[in-house]
Image: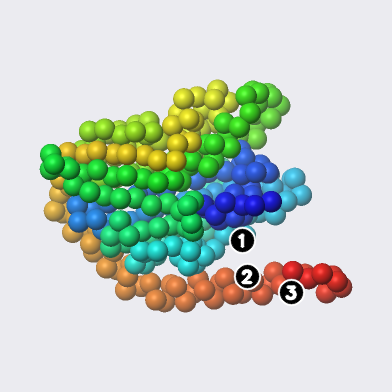
Amino acid sequence: MKLSHKPLLTAALMLAMTVLPGCLQTSSILTVLPDGTGKVDVRMAVNGALFAAQGGKNPMEEMHVIEMWNDSKGLESISNVKRGKDPKTGFDFVSFTAYFKDVNKVSLGKGRDSFAAKLKKTDAGGFELLIRNGSSSDFAQKMLQGNKPIPPEQEMVFDNFKLHEEYRLPGNIKKATHLAMTKGRVASITVTKADVIAKAPVLKQAASKSRTITTGPVSMTKKEIATFKAAAAKSLAAWPKLKAELEARKKKADAKKKKKRNPNDPFPS
Protein backbone atom coordinates (compact mmCIF):
# COMPACT_ATOMS: atom_id res chain seq x y z
CA MET A 1 0.00 0.00 0.00
CA LYS A 2 1.39 3.39 -0.96
CA LEU A 3 0.75 6.07 1.62
CA SER A 4 0.71 9.72 0.67
CA HIS A 5 2.98 11.76 2.95
CA LYS A 6 0.70 14.62 3.86
CA PRO A 7 2.39 17.73 5.25
CA LEU A 8 0.85 17.86 8.71
CA LEU A 9 -0.12 14.20 8.91
CA THR A 10 2.20 11.24 9.20
CA ALA A 11 1.94 7.97 7.31
CA ALA A 12 0.59 6.43 10.51
CA LEU A 13 -2.35 8.83 10.47
CA MET A 14 -2.96 8.28 6.78
CA LEU A 15 -3.13 4.55 7.49
CA ALA A 16 -5.58 5.28 10.28
CA MET A 17 -7.71 7.15 7.77
CA THR A 18 -7.77 4.07 5.53
CA VAL A 19 -8.61 1.60 8.28
CA LEU A 20 -10.86 3.56 10.66
CA PRO A 21 -11.64 6.90 9.00
CA GLY A 22 -14.09 8.08 11.64
CA CYS A 23 -11.74 7.82 14.61
CA LEU A 24 -9.79 11.00 13.79
CA GLN A 25 -9.66 14.67 14.65
CA THR A 26 -7.33 17.13 12.95
CA SER A 27 -6.89 20.87 13.31
CA SER A 28 -4.47 23.25 11.60
CA ILE A 29 -4.49 27.02 12.12
CA LEU A 30 -2.21 29.13 9.92
CA THR A 31 -1.47 32.69 11.07
CA VAL A 32 0.25 35.11 8.69
CA LEU A 33 1.45 38.63 9.53
CA PRO A 34 1.80 41.56 7.07
CA ASP A 35 5.53 40.87 6.58
CA GLY A 36 4.94 37.18 5.76
CA THR A 37 6.11 35.81 9.09
CA GLY A 38 3.75 33.53 10.96
CA LYS A 39 3.01 30.19 12.55
CA VAL A 40 0.92 27.07 12.16
CA ASP A 41 -0.78 25.43 15.14
CA VAL A 42 -1.38 21.72 14.59
CA ARG A 43 -3.39 19.19 16.60
CA MET A 44 -3.96 15.56 15.61
CA ALA A 45 -5.94 13.01 17.62
CA VAL A 46 -7.18 9.44 17.25
CA ASN A 47 -9.47 7.14 19.17
CA GLY A 48 -6.83 4.77 20.47
CA ALA A 49 -9.41 2.62 22.25
CA LEU A 50 -11.20 1.98 18.95
CA PHE A 51 -7.95 0.86 17.34
CA ALA A 52 -7.26 -1.47 20.25
CA ALA A 53 -10.77 -2.98 19.95
CA GLN A 54 -10.01 -3.69 16.29
CA GLY A 55 -6.69 -5.31 17.19
CA GLY A 56 -4.70 -2.42 15.72
CA LYS A 57 -1.93 -0.14 16.95
CA ASN A 58 -2.51 3.42 18.08
CA PRO A 59 -1.04 5.71 15.34
CA MET A 60 -0.15 8.33 17.96
CA GLU A 61 2.54 5.97 19.25
CA GLU A 62 4.37 6.41 15.93
CA MET A 63 3.70 10.13 15.58
CA HIS A 64 6.93 12.12 16.06
CA VAL A 65 6.98 15.89 15.58
CA ILE A 66 10.68 15.81 14.67
CA GLU A 67 9.77 13.86 11.51
CA MET A 68 7.54 16.72 10.37
CA TRP A 69 10.42 19.12 11.01
CA ASN A 70 12.87 17.00 9.02
CA ASP A 71 10.45 16.67 6.08
CA SER A 72 9.66 20.40 5.92
CA LYS A 73 11.33 23.55 4.64
CA GLY A 74 11.21 27.16 5.77
CA LEU A 75 10.43 26.55 9.44
CA GLU A 76 12.36 28.48 12.08
CA SER A 77 11.35 26.68 15.27
CA ILE A 78 8.78 24.46 16.97
CA SER A 79 7.26 24.94 20.41
CA ASN A 80 4.33 23.94 22.62
CA VAL A 81 4.74 20.23 21.86
CA LYS A 82 2.12 18.30 23.83
CA ARG A 83 0.95 14.69 24.06
CA GLY A 84 -1.95 13.38 26.08
CA LYS A 85 -5.52 12.17 26.23
CA ASP A 86 -8.41 14.56 25.63
CA PRO A 87 -10.61 14.47 28.76
CA LYS A 88 -13.78 15.12 26.73
CA THR A 89 -13.38 12.59 23.92
CA GLY A 90 -10.80 10.18 25.30
CA PHE A 91 -8.81 10.59 22.08
CA ASP A 92 -4.99 10.42 22.21
CA PHE A 93 -3.50 13.60 20.75
CA VAL A 94 -0.30 15.33 19.68
CA SER A 95 -0.13 19.10 19.20
CA PHE A 96 2.56 21.68 18.43
CA THR A 97 3.25 25.15 17.01
CA ALA A 98 5.69 25.75 14.14
CA TYR A 99 7.04 29.26 13.44
CA PHE A 100 8.39 30.59 10.13
CA LYS A 101 9.97 33.79 8.79
CA ASP A 102 8.50 33.75 5.29
CA VAL A 103 5.29 31.90 4.43
CA ASN A 104 6.33 31.89 0.76
CA LYS A 105 9.30 29.66 1.59
CA VAL A 106 7.40 27.16 3.74
CA SER A 107 6.78 23.63 2.53
CA LEU A 108 5.35 21.14 5.01
CA GLY A 109 5.93 17.61 3.80
CA LYS A 110 7.45 16.11 0.67
CA GLY A 111 6.74 16.37 -3.05
CA ARG A 112 3.47 17.36 -4.69
CA ASP A 113 1.48 16.44 -1.59
CA SER A 114 3.26 19.06 0.50
CA PHE A 115 1.40 22.00 1.98
CA ALA A 116 2.47 25.39 0.64
CA ALA A 117 1.07 28.92 0.72
CA LYS A 118 1.94 32.02 -1.29
CA LEU A 119 1.20 35.51 0.02
CA LYS A 120 1.23 38.62 -2.15
CA LYS A 121 -0.07 42.15 -1.94
CA THR A 122 -2.97 43.23 -4.14
CA ASP A 123 -3.33 46.44 -6.12
CA ALA A 124 -6.06 47.48 -3.67
CA GLY A 125 -3.61 47.44 -0.76
CA GLY A 126 -4.75 44.12 0.66
CA PHE A 127 -3.39 40.59 0.47
CA GLU A 128 -4.01 37.40 -1.46
CA LEU A 129 -3.09 34.01 0.00
CA LEU A 130 -2.92 31.01 -2.31
CA ILE A 131 -2.95 27.65 -0.51
CA ARG A 132 -1.97 24.28 -1.95
CA ASN A 133 -3.17 21.10 -0.27
CA GLY A 134 -5.26 22.18 2.69
CA SER A 135 -4.75 19.88 5.68
CA SER A 136 -8.22 18.34 5.37
CA SER A 137 -8.22 17.67 1.60
CA ASP A 138 -7.07 14.04 1.62
CA PHE A 139 -9.43 13.18 4.45
CA ALA A 140 -12.41 14.79 2.75
CA GLN A 141 -11.62 13.06 -0.53
CA LYS A 142 -11.61 9.74 1.29
CA MET A 143 -15.03 10.54 2.76
CA LEU A 144 -16.43 11.29 -0.71
CA GLN A 145 -15.35 7.98 -2.23
CA GLY A 146 -18.34 5.88 -3.26
CA ASN A 147 -21.94 7.01 -3.54
CA LYS A 148 -23.42 4.54 -1.10
CA PRO A 149 -24.68 6.00 2.20
CA ILE A 150 -22.98 4.98 5.43
CA PRO A 151 -24.99 2.15 7.10
CA PRO A 152 -26.65 3.27 10.38
CA GLU A 153 -24.75 0.61 12.33
CA GLN A 154 -21.46 2.18 11.19
CA GLU A 155 -22.35 5.78 11.98
CA MET A 156 -21.10 5.49 15.55
CA VAL A 157 -17.57 5.10 14.19
CA PHE A 158 -17.73 8.80 13.30
CA ASP A 159 -18.60 9.98 16.81
CA ASN A 160 -16.36 12.98 17.65
CA PHE A 161 -14.97 13.00 14.08
CA LYS A 162 -13.75 16.49 13.13
CA LEU A 163 -11.55 18.15 10.51
CA HIS A 164 -10.75 21.82 11.05
CA GLU A 165 -8.68 24.11 8.85
CA GLU A 166 -8.27 27.83 9.63
CA TYR A 167 -6.41 30.82 8.21
CA ARG A 168 -5.79 34.07 10.12
CA LEU A 169 -4.60 36.91 7.90
CA PRO A 170 -3.42 40.55 8.28
CA GLY A 171 -6.61 42.14 6.87
CA ASN A 172 -10.34 41.48 6.91
CA ILE A 173 -11.43 38.71 4.55
CA LYS A 174 -13.14 39.94 1.38
CA LYS A 175 -13.34 36.63 -0.47
CA ALA A 176 -12.43 32.99 0.21
CA THR A 177 -12.77 29.98 -2.10
CA HIS A 178 -13.28 26.42 -0.82
CA LEU A 179 -13.57 27.70 2.73
CA ALA A 180 -17.00 27.66 4.36
CA MET A 181 -16.76 30.41 6.98
CA THR A 182 -15.30 33.92 7.08
CA LYS A 183 -15.35 36.35 9.98
CA GLY A 184 -13.14 39.40 10.28
CA ARG A 185 -9.58 38.31 9.48
CA VAL A 186 -10.35 34.58 9.73
CA ALA A 187 -11.41 32.06 7.05
CA SER A 188 -12.05 28.44 7.98
CA ILE A 189 -13.70 25.14 7.16
CA THR A 190 -14.88 22.40 9.53
CA VAL A 191 -16.16 18.93 8.69
CA THR A 192 -18.04 16.91 11.34
CA LYS A 193 -19.84 13.58 11.62
CA ALA A 194 -23.11 15.12 10.41
CA ASP A 195 -21.40 16.43 7.26
CA VAL A 196 -19.92 13.02 6.47
CA ILE A 197 -23.20 11.17 7.00
CA ALA A 198 -25.10 13.66 4.81
CA LYS A 199 -22.30 14.03 2.22
CA ALA A 200 -22.75 17.75 2.81
CA PRO A 201 -21.45 20.40 0.35
CA VAL A 202 -18.81 21.41 2.90
CA LEU A 203 -17.20 18.02 2.31
CA LYS A 204 -16.61 18.88 -1.36
CA GLN A 205 -15.16 22.24 -0.39
CA ALA A 206 -12.74 20.58 2.02
CA ALA A 207 -11.72 18.03 -0.63
CA SER A 208 -10.40 20.75 -2.95
CA LYS A 209 -6.62 20.78 -3.31
CA SER A 210 -6.44 24.58 -3.29
CA ARG A 211 -7.87 27.60 -1.50
CA THR A 212 -7.61 31.32 -2.27
CA ILE A 213 -8.20 34.11 0.25
CA THR A 214 -8.34 37.83 -0.54
CA THR A 215 -8.23 40.48 2.19
CA GLY A 216 -8.48 44.21 2.62
CA PRO A 217 -5.65 46.42 4.00
CA VAL A 218 -3.85 45.56 7.23
CA SER A 219 -6.15 45.67 10.26
CA MET A 220 -3.90 43.71 12.63
CA THR A 221 -2.88 45.96 15.53
CA LYS A 222 0.69 46.83 16.52
CA LYS A 223 0.07 45.13 19.87
CA GLU A 224 -0.95 41.89 18.16
CA ILE A 225 2.16 41.98 16.00
CA ALA A 226 4.44 42.71 18.96
CA THR A 227 2.89 39.85 20.97
CA PHE A 228 3.50 37.46 18.08
CA LYS A 229 7.11 38.60 17.60
CA ALA A 230 7.82 38.04 21.30
CA ALA A 231 6.37 34.52 21.19
CA ALA A 232 8.35 33.70 18.03
CA ALA A 233 11.60 34.92 19.61
CA LYS A 234 10.94 32.84 22.73
CA SER A 235 10.27 29.76 20.60
CA LEU A 236 13.48 30.28 18.60
CA ALA A 237 15.58 30.60 21.76
CA ALA A 238 14.16 27.38 23.23
CA TRP A 239 14.24 25.36 20.00
CA PRO A 240 17.79 23.89 20.14
CA LYS A 241 17.09 22.22 23.49
CA LEU A 242 13.61 21.05 22.49
CA LYS A 243 14.90 19.73 19.15
CA ALA A 244 17.51 17.63 20.95
CA GLU A 245 14.81 16.24 23.25
CA LEU A 246 12.54 15.33 20.33
CA GLU A 247 15.39 13.65 18.48
CA ALA A 248 16.28 11.63 21.59
CA ARG A 249 12.63 10.61 22.02
CA LYS A 250 12.44 9.42 18.41
CA LYS A 251 15.72 7.49 18.74
CA LYS A 252 14.48 5.81 21.91
CA ALA A 253 11.17 4.87 20.27
CA ASP A 254 12.99 3.40 17.25
CA ALA A 255 15.25 1.34 19.52
CA LYS A 256 12.25 0.04 21.46
CA LYS A 257 10.47 -0.92 18.24
CA LYS A 258 13.56 -2.73 16.97
CA LYS A 259 13.89 -4.64 20.25
CA LYS A 260 10.29 -5.87 19.98
CA ARG A 261 10.92 -7.52 16.60
CA ASN A 262 10.92 -11.29 16.52
CA PRO A 263 14.58 -12.43 16.71
CA ASN A 264 13.63 -15.61 14.85
CA ASP A 265 12.20 -13.73 11.89
CA PRO A 266 14.18 -14.92 8.83
CA PHE A 267 13.24 -11.75 6.93
CA PRO A 268 13.78 -8.81 9.33
CA SER A 269 12.89 -5.40 7.94
SS at circle 1: helix
Q: How many marks?
A: 3
| First along the sequence among labels 1 and 3 | 1
Residue 69 quadrant: bottom left
Reading the image, the residue beneath label 3 is: 259
Q: Position of residue 225 (x, y in %)?
A: 19, 55
Of helix, strand and loop, which one carries label 3? Answer: helix
Residue at 65% in and 43% down: 18
Sequence-wise, the earlier of marks 3 and 2 is 2
What residue is drawn where x is 43% and y is 72%? 242
Q: Which of the two residues, 241 or 266, is positioned nearer the viewer here? A: 266
Q: Which residue is mark 1?
A: 62
Residue on which disc 2 sits: 253
Q: CA distance from mark 3 to mark 2?
A: 10 Å
Estimate the x, y position of residue 51 in percent, counting from the top left: 69, 47
The answer to whether the residues at label 2 and label 1 have Cβ atoms under 8 Å apart is yes
Marks 2 and 1 sit apart, C-alpha to C-alpha, by 8 Å
The three-letter code of the residue at mark 1 reads Glu
